[in-house]
Amino acid sequence: MDKQPNSPRERAAAQTGFARLDGEPFPAFEAGWVWLVGAGPGAPGLMSLLCYHALQSSDVVVYDALVNPGILNWVRPGTELEYAGKRGGKPSAQQRDISLRLIELAQAGKRVLRLKGGDPFMFGRGGEECQHLVKAGIPFRIVPGITAGIGGLAYAGLPSTHRDTNHSVIFLTGHDASGKMPANVNWQAIATASPVIVMYMAVKNLREIAKALIAGGRAPSDPVTIISNATLPQQSVAQTTLGEAKAFLDHDEFATPAIVVLGRIVEWRSILDWYRGPLRENPIG
């Protein structure tokens, strides 16, 4: 007679597929802790196992605007959901208020999941929130996520690096706290520092950014690619040049969130554009 599995680990090992994860020794999500977790660039299938574990273990999820609602369908029943999204030009929560809310919930003994689109530390204000947690004596864990500047490019058929086009890449944000083009960026130095520049939240200020980069020595003919709703079924990709960016934006409107990519890696798209046809029908990614 075959021996029956007794421990949770043994029972999980006898399972197949995702059921096998039930017996894995995931880190405990303790009461009074805050986990800052990256949910990935959009498609639910791109979240990490630790992200899924946190969704199943938390008491309250404080989530951003860029978190795919489909991901929230995977929270444990009874979990509280609190929206704390910030979108340019729309009424938004204040960053200080969000940080104070995280502290308040943790001090109440909640297991607090701070869920962010992409990666918490890539233009996600995660560092600032952690600073507040440290000052308040709140323990926390960081769970990195796939950032749109890498995952979004991959879904558009653009390799972030390729030995035939670029050995470096620059990531920057296209607006500051006021929503304007960042004044503390040395655009002249940035212009020619890397063959590829990936810009987050840059569509609104792209006209001014393009002008500054050209003034800094970047070629007006350099390709510009705008990826909207990256990794989602409604993803769209538009192409222009740095010199034509203003006229291009004046003529067309682009859905946000969007990633702006400057550089020749767009040339690989004709070969590597894999996210097409039936592949877009799967909402998981």
Image (cartoon, grey):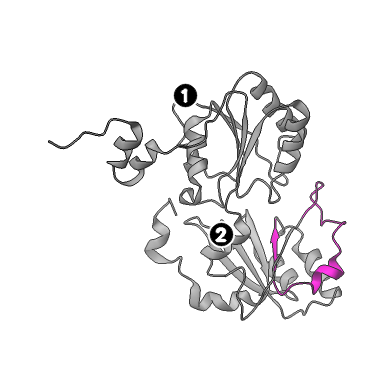
| Residue 164 to residue 4: above or below | below
Queried whether the magenta region covers residue 180, the answer comes back as yes
Instruction: Name the amino acid, label 1.
Output: Gly
| Residue 215 to residue 126: above or below | below
Crowd class of label 2 (few under 14; some 14 to 19; many from 20; radius 10 Å): many
Q: Are marks 1 and 2 in contact (CB under 8 Å)?
A: no
Which sits in the foreground, 253 or 235? 235
Instruction: Give the structural element (helix, strand or loop) at label 2.
Output: helix
Q: Which of marks 2 and 1 precedes in the sequence?
A: 1
Q: Give me the C-alpha separation between circle 1 and circle 2.
A: 31 Å
- Residue 80 x, y percent position in the rendering: 54, 26
| Residue 205 to residue 176: above or below | below
Instruction: Name the amino acid, label 2.
Output: Gly
Quarter of the image with the C terminus in it: bottom left
- Residue 30 x, y percent position in the rendering: 56, 26
Tell me the number on the disc at residue 78.
Answer: 1
Please identify the quarter of the rendering in which residue 212 is found: bottom right
Instruction: Give the structural element (helix, strand or loop) at label 1.
Output: loop
Q: Give the residue drawn at x 82%, y 47%.
A: 178
Magenta span main SS: loop
Crowd class of label 1 (few under 14; some 14 to 19; many from 20; radius 10 Å): few
Tell me the number on the disc at residue 151.
Answer: 2
- What residue span does the magenta drawing correspond to? 175-200
| Residue 127 to residue 223: above or below | above
